[in-house]
Amino acid sequence: MAETVLGVIGGSGFYQMDGLEGVEQIELRTPFGNPSDLYYRGRIGGSTVVFLSRHGRGHRILPSEINYRANIHGLKQLGVQYLVSVSAAGSMREDLAPGDFIVPDQFIDHTFKRPMSFFGNGLVGHVSMADPVCAALGARLTQAGQAAGARIRQGGTYLSIEGPQFSTRAESLLYRAWNVDVISMTAVQEARLAREAEMCFAILALVTDYDCWHQSAKQVDIGDVIRVLNENVATARKAIGVLATDLNHHQPACACSRALEGTIVTDRNLIPRQTRTDLELIIGKYL
């Protein structure tokens, strides 16, 4: 069985997990520029775990400014097979309360400024995103959350907005009519690029507040969001530790590692040399 390498994108607190051993800092460059920060690699439960702070240390990078392609490419360089995106989110449902966790299995992308594919520059590929979350990894993540003591549910729809402002009340009521479960700003691009990088992907969303549709919410307050988030980070870290241990013993059976099969439609003889070079890590086995 191949060594398990679990990637986690989240806040800077995750590389301070209990039981994480031999932590090293790794600086990487990618064909798409610089990642958000250094990567932190260690071992827990027999698995290698790689962490990246998506907003950079000190939370310096806006959601629209994150170099998602560089972040995912760097994780691919480090051998990540399984990727968990840990994200704060607002609740769009009465029965999904602040402090709860959810592992969504669907996304609605309402962003408009961000590169969302490794393809381009003379190379065309069309990857299926019908089911954007690895069902096997999502189930294991939910079980890990339960073992960590989280109030957690599996399944639901994550709406990603551009930000950085929170929604207007009219927008929030409109999104409610779309029957979404949570609202946030970052995970959709990570899901898209992880699929193209042939990683198993799942998201652990930490519900920090009710969006402003809720009668108890006069407006979304970032102070309250951060307070609830900090209260739940320890549980999220514990869930990641449980998942890492589980994956070391039982790797899920899925087709994520073959997601690019049959998706490249460009004549191989016409793919520009630089594009081939830049994407060798991702598409090399299909050329």
Image (cartoon, grey):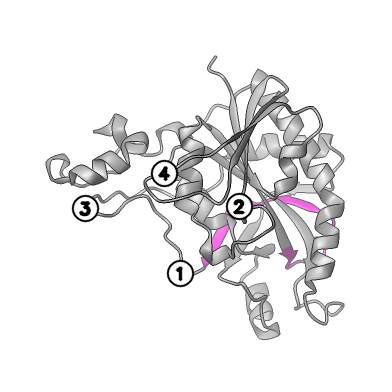
Which element carries disc 3, helix, strand or loop? loop
- The part of the image, by quadrant, that contains residue 207 is bottom right
How crowded is the residue under tag 2: few (<14 C-alpha within 10 Å), some, or many (20+)? Answer: many
Q: CA distance from mark 1 to mark 3?
A: 21 Å
**Residue under label 1:** 113
Which element carries disc 2, helix, strand or loop? loop
Residue 181, given in percent of the width and then of the height, sits at 69, 62
Q: Residue furthest top?
A: 1
Examine the rendering and report whether any part of residue 91 can be seen.
yes
Task: Give the amino acid at mark 1.
Answer: Lys
Q: Nearer the viewer, mark 4 or mark 3?
A: 4
Tell me, yes or no, whether the two marked residues, 2 and 3, touch with CB atoms within 8 Å. no
**Residue under label 2:** 54
Task: Give the amino acid at mark 2.
Answer: Arg
Q: CA distance from mark 1 to mark 2?
A: 17 Å
Residue depicted at 76% across the width and 30% down the height: 242
Which element carries disc 1, helix, strand or loop? loop
Residue 277, given in percent of the width and then of the height, sits at 27, 39
Task: Give the amino acid at mark 4.
Answer: Thr
